[in-house]
Image (tube, rainbow, N blue to C red):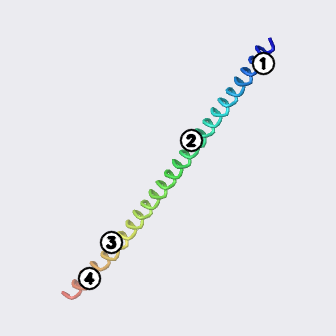
Amino acid sequence: MKKAEQERREREELDKMLEENQRRVEEAQRREALEQQQKELERYQELERLQKQKEEAMRRKKMEEEEERANQMKLLGKNKSRPKLSFALGLK
């Protein structure tokens, strides 16, 4: 009887150890999955931030180019009108 009792107790202890190990493994896997998810989220946010920066830079560049073009048109417009004026005055 004592031997059977001891075997039963040892089996219960072993089962408890196995359950505890299984719980630890599952906990570690869950923690690892959460960490992985967090890393992916951070990476996505970083990519999103870089994309916004790129779009902002392109928008600024486009605005600068448009301003430059407008300035050139003003200059060209002034330069074109001056020779016409002086030419017109020269005919008189």
Query: Disc 2 or 3, which lies upstream in sequence?
Result: 2
Q: Nearer the viewer, mark 2 or mark 3?
A: 2
User: CA–CA distance between discs 2 and 1?
Assistant: 46 Å
Q: Which residue is mark 4?
A: 85
Q: Amino acid at mark 1?
A: Gln
The single residue placed furthest to the top in the displayed view is 1
- In the visual, does 29 lie left or right of 61? right
Residue at image position (38%, 67%) is: 65
From the image, tell me which residue sits under label 3: 73
Q: Residues within 10 Å of mark 1 (few under 14, many from 20)?
A: few
Count residues near mark 3 (Cα–Cα under 10 Å), then give few for <14, some for 14-19, many for 20+: few
Cα–Cα gap, marks 2 and 3: 53 Å
Q: N-terminal of the two: label 2 or label 4? A: 2
Mark 2: give few (<14), some (14-19) or many (20+) Cα within 10 Å.
few
The amino acid type found where label 2 is placed reads Gln
Secondary element at tag 2: helix
Mark 4 vs mark 1, CA separation in Å: 117 Å
Residue at mark 1: 6
Please tell me which residue lies in front, 27 or 21: 21
